[in-house]
Image (cartoon, grey):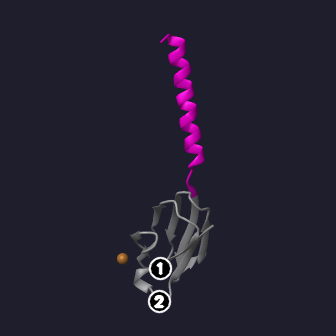
Amino acid sequence: MSLKTVAALLVFALFSFSRVDAAYADVEIALSYKDKKFDPSEISAPANTPIVIKFKNLDNDAMELESDSLKIEKVVPAGKDATIKVKAQKAGRYEFFDEYNEKTARGALVVK
Ligand SMILES: [Cu+2]
């Protein structure tokens, strides 16, 4: 291969990778927790797209963000942030909760 061919292939490869990256870009969702409630209590995301939840625990107590269907289990101390990665999901409604206040502190991710 000539140097020109190698250069052309490299450029092509770089282009292909960046296109793949763009197609699978994560979606970022802000979610916070205060006074034992999620804010907002319902978040939404597109189907088949990896999700990054930028979470803030603004409460005075530690909490444990948990979801069986989304396979999340994360203790977040009072006043701390957490970045939570969720795999791409099919359309549906996925509940999450604070395990320390499971009955009242509930929210849902709606994927469509
Ligand atoms: Cu747990």
Q: From the viewer's perspective, tell me whether residue 77 is left or right of residue 90.
A: left
Residue 18 against residue 72 in the figure, above or below: above
> Which one is nearer the viewer's eye here, 53 or 25?
25
The tag on residue 21 is none
Q: How far apart are marks 1 and 2 (CA)?
A: 8 Å
Secondary structure mostly taken by the magenta-highlighted segment of the chain: helix
Identify residue type, mark 1. Answer: Phe
Residue at the spot of label 1: 97
Residue 29 against residue 33 in the figure, above or below: above
Q: How crowded is mark 1: few (under 14 residues within 10 Å), some or many (20 or more)?
A: many
| Residue at horizontal 45 percent and vertical 67 percent from the top | 80
Precedes in sequence: disc 1 or disc 2:
1
Q: In which quarter of the image is the C terminus?
A: bottom right
What residue occupies the far bottom of the structure in this picture?
Answer: 103
Q: Position of residue 111 (x, y in %)?
A: 59, 68
Q: Position of residue 27 (x, y in %)?
A: 58, 57
Q: Where is residue 29 in the image (x, y as percent from the top left)?
A: 58, 63
Residue at the spot of label 2: 103
| Residue span colored magenta | 1-27
Q: Position of residue 55 (x, y in %)?
A: 51, 66
Identify residue type, mark 2. Answer: Lys
| Residue at horizontal 57 percent and vertical 59 percent from the top | 28
